[in-house]
């Protein structure tokens, strides 16, 4: 049986399935962040596959506006279901090409979609290539891949002096949310974050306000933000944390604010019991990778980005 997501009980099943197959799941600890995307407001943008016993075996989402097919598949049934998942996603993507409501701008059409895979997932790679997806790591112009990084939560922290007039604090109140959304859009040059989604994120059962940090500039504006997620079982069956998203305003960079934000987030994660902390970034951002390595992260997985144009 298969059907669309029907609300909070199904979201719980989707999270539970991700925890049953952590080695096959790229987004686990930060999955609540991805599951609050507004694509979920329409059941037809999701699909859930159940076996004859009513056990969830796979799920997929066309995630707007990131243009990604997000999915989790039980490794027991992956060989038989993975192709079905991709075929469903491709069919749904074709059906919404002319739906303007899914566009960020009047000229934006959902003609390009992406799927991320861990380098070791060779069977998934073969299925993607067979359906016309192209690995962006090997394209001649603007190659794109990602790295998934990890650091021990108890790794030593180098104390950072906060510049005069700045202060780190928790996100607080309606004014903060609006300012953080504006900053998110400016940092990532994207309209993906909206106030409605930011509020929805804060209502997630896995959301912890002590991990939702901002850094305030001397003029009381927000200079940066860092959101952490905590999972008591994580990737290895042990507590873990993940940073997603984080950003600093362009006019406040080169002041060490990213490290200050991360250090504070690391402390809270360790206090919650996290043993490992994870994050993902683009391979074409050497400065970002160097920043993360300087605070103890190392590359755990190479992540391939596959692209399909309609």
Image (cartoon, rainbow, N blue to C red):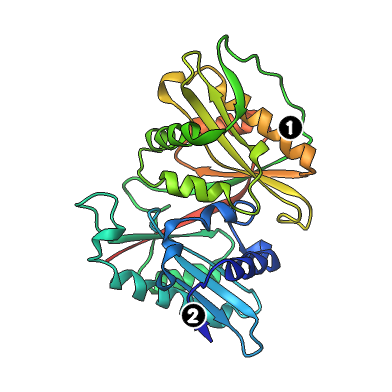
**Sequence-wise first label, 1 or 2:** 2
Numbered circles on residues, count: 2
104 on left or right of 261? left
Q: Position of residue 283 (x, y in %)?
A: 48, 42
- Quadrant, the N terminus: bottom right
Q: Is residue 226 above or below residue 98?
A: above
Q: Position of residue 227 (x, y in %)?
A: 58, 39
Residues under numbered marks 1 and 2 in contact, where contact means CB atoms less than 8 Å apart: no
Foreground disc of the pair 1, 2: 2
Residue 176 image offset from top left, x and y in percent: 49, 32
> Which quadrant would residue 110 be assigned to in this image?
bottom left
Is residue 123 among the parts visible in the rendering?
yes
| Quadrant (top left/top right/bottom left/bottom right) for the C terminus | bottom left
Residue toward you, 32 or 114: 32
Question: In which quarter of the view is residue 170 placed?
Answer: top right
Marking on residue 3: 2
- Few, some or many C-alpha atoms within 10 Å of disc 1 (few <14, some 14-19, many ≥20)? some
Residue 153 appears in the figure: no
Q: Quadrant of residue 97?
A: bottom left
Farthest residue in the bottom direction? Answer: 52
Q: Secondary structure at mark 1?
A: helix
The residue labelled by disc 1 is: 267
The answer to which of 199 and 258 lies nearer the viewer is 199
**In the foreground, 272 or 250:** 272
Above or below, comparing residue 5 to residue 80 in the picture: above
């Amino acid at each position: 049986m298969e059907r669309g997501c029907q609300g909070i009980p199904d979201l719980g099943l989707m999270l539970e399935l991700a925890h049953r197959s952590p080695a096959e799941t790229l987004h686990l600890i930060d999955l609540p962040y991805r599951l609050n995307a507004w694509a979920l407001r329409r059941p037809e943008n999701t699909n859930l596959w159940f076996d004859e016993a009513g056990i969830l075996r796979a799920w997929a989402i066309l995630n707007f506006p990131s243009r990604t097919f997000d999915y989790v598949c039980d490794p027991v049934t992956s060989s038989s279901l993975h192709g079905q998942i991709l075929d469903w996603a491709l069919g749904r993507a074709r059906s919404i090409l002319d739906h303007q409501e899914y566009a960020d701008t009047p000229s934006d059409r959902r003609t390009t979609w992406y799927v991320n895979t861990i380098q070791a997932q060779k069977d998934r790679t073969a299925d993607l290539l067979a359906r016309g997806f192209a690995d962006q790591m090997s394209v001649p112009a603007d190659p794109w891949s990602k790295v998934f990084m990890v650091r021990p939560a108890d790794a030593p922290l180098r104390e950072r002096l906060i510049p005069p007039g700045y202060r780190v604090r928790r996100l607080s109140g309606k004014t903060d949310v609006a300012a953080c959304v504006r900053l998110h859009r400016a940092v990532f040059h994207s309209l993906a974050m909206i106030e409605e989604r930011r509020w929805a994120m804060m209502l997630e059962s896995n959301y912890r306000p002590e991990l939702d940090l901002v850094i305030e500039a001397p003029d009381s504006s927000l200079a940066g933000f860092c959101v952490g997620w905590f999972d008591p079982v994580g990737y290895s069956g042990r507590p873990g944390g993940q940073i997603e998203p984080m950003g600093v305003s362009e006019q406040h960079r080169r002041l060490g604010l990213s490290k200050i934000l991360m250090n504070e987030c690391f402390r809270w994660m360790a206090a919650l019991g996290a043993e490992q902390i994870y994050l993902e970034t683009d391979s074409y951002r050497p400065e970002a990778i160097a920043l993360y390595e300087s605070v103890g992260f190392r590359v755990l997985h190479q992540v391939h980005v596959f692209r399909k144009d309609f």
